[in-house]
Amino acid sequence: MLPSRKKTTSRIYIYKVRDETGKSFCGLVEAPDPRAIKKNLRSSNLYFVSARPFRTSQLYRKKVSLETLLMFTHRMYSLIEAGIPILSSLNILWRQTEDLTMQLVVSRMMLQIESGNSLSEAVAEFPNIFSNIYIAMITVGESGAGLVPLLKELSLYLEAQKQFISRIKRATIYPSIVMVIALLVMLFMFIFVVPTFQRVLNSINAEMPMITQVLMFISDTIRTVYFPVISLAVLLGLYYLYRYMERVPKMRRILDDWKMKVPILGEIVYILSLGRFTRTLGLLSGSGLQIIRSLQIARSTIGNQKIEDAVHDVEQQISQGISLYEAFRSVPVFPVIMLEMVGIAEKKGNISVAFEKLAVHFDEKADYLLNRFLVLLEPILIIVVGSIVGFILAGVYLPIFSLWKGFAG
């Protein structure tokens, strides 16, 4: 009887290697043991460092920055346009990327393609990194539209998303910094300055007006041990309430409706949401994707429940045979310029071009509104901070002026 052979089973390993320059890379490979990995790497000009078992489920929860995804897409487009096969392009990208998570993702994608899967199936395995838009565009590209032009469009789309985030940061960073500095100054005065004057005024039995009494009460409250605890509890409570409202559709609808009613900011939120929606819809419809499927994917990028509900109504009406223009017009959410451009484009048969032009229009309008908001915000913040400081100074110096006036009389 022949001796029974021990059956070897392969498993996924995460390995670390170095190239000739000393640069380190991490990747995923299916192998029976680390020795097999080291043996397979001998002919690749890479030097084996280490390997350990890895659960691919750990990778599915990871995310990468928009900058990393943009760089990956742009390089992928350049390599494939140059005639380099997809697998070789991914191998080059694996060596170029500095992000550890992206190294592992690209390595996993190479394993999938080597196993016979398509590029769209490989990217669909990581929905936290590649959005529905990304997956849909790759799928359309593989089905005949061509990967090169669609990867180029994806690069431009991600660049637009980067500019969108930049707009949001530009509108929030400056007021946030001013308010934080104002808060720190106010706390410093309440904790250190006001108590000093309070002791002086108490020692001379000075009569304190109402504004000074309010000031002293606030200072005493802030300096208690309970104040930071209560403040933290309130902030956490508001945070979790907001998260809860974001998760519940009915509550999110109320929250998003309230956001759109805030003066100036509400219009900015509305225009930014429309810009993101029209840009995505123009990209998807221009790639050859069916209009209903394009609307469904674009709807997920809006970020406002009220507009999302309106787009959902548009989808239902189009599925019943109603024209795109009539479907948009029946929902009282979209501006007149959008309705008119959609109506004209539908007759001419260039819907995707119309949505791309609308996206540019909304971006320009958002820039104008953000600039106007920042111009208005600066004097408002100065007035608010000045009022707070003035209130504190008035509360401190009024009793002193009263005493001085008494001595002078």
Image (cartoon, rainbow, N blue to C red):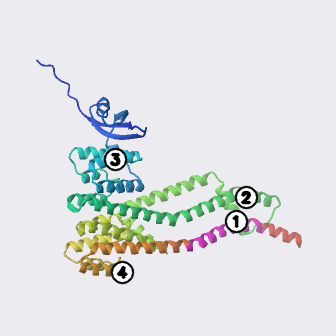
Q: Residue at x 47, y 58 (%)?
A: 239
Judging by the rendered image, the residue that carries numbered circle 2 is 193
Work out whether 332 lies above or below 275: below
Give the extent of the magenta segment. Answer: 375-398
Query: In the displayed structure, does residue 56 sit left or right of residue 171?
Result: left
Q: Which residue is mark 1?
A: 392
* Mark pair 2, 1: CA separation: 10 Å
- Does residue 152 appear in this view? yes
Q: Amino acid at mark 2?
A: Val
Q: Quadrant of residue 378?
A: bottom right
Q: Which mark sits nearer the N-terminus, 4 or 1?
A: 4
Mark 1, Cα crowd under 10 Å, few <14 / some 14-19 / many 20+, is many
Q: Which mark is residue 92?
A: 3
Identify the residue position indicated by label 4 in the image. Answer: 337
Mark 2 or mark 1: which comes first in sequence?
2
Question: Is mark 2 in CB contact (under 8 Å) with mark 1?
Answer: yes
In the rendered image, residue 70 lying in the magenta stretch gets the answer: no
Q: Nearer the viewer, residue 226 or 242?
A: 242
Task: Estimate how packed mark 4 is, as few (under 14), some (14 to 19) or many (20 or more) residues with alpha carbons within 10 Å.
Answer: few
The answer to whether residue 59 is seen in the rendering is no
Q: Residue at x 55, y 54 (%)?
A: 232
Q: Position of residue 56 (x, y in %)?
A: 31, 42
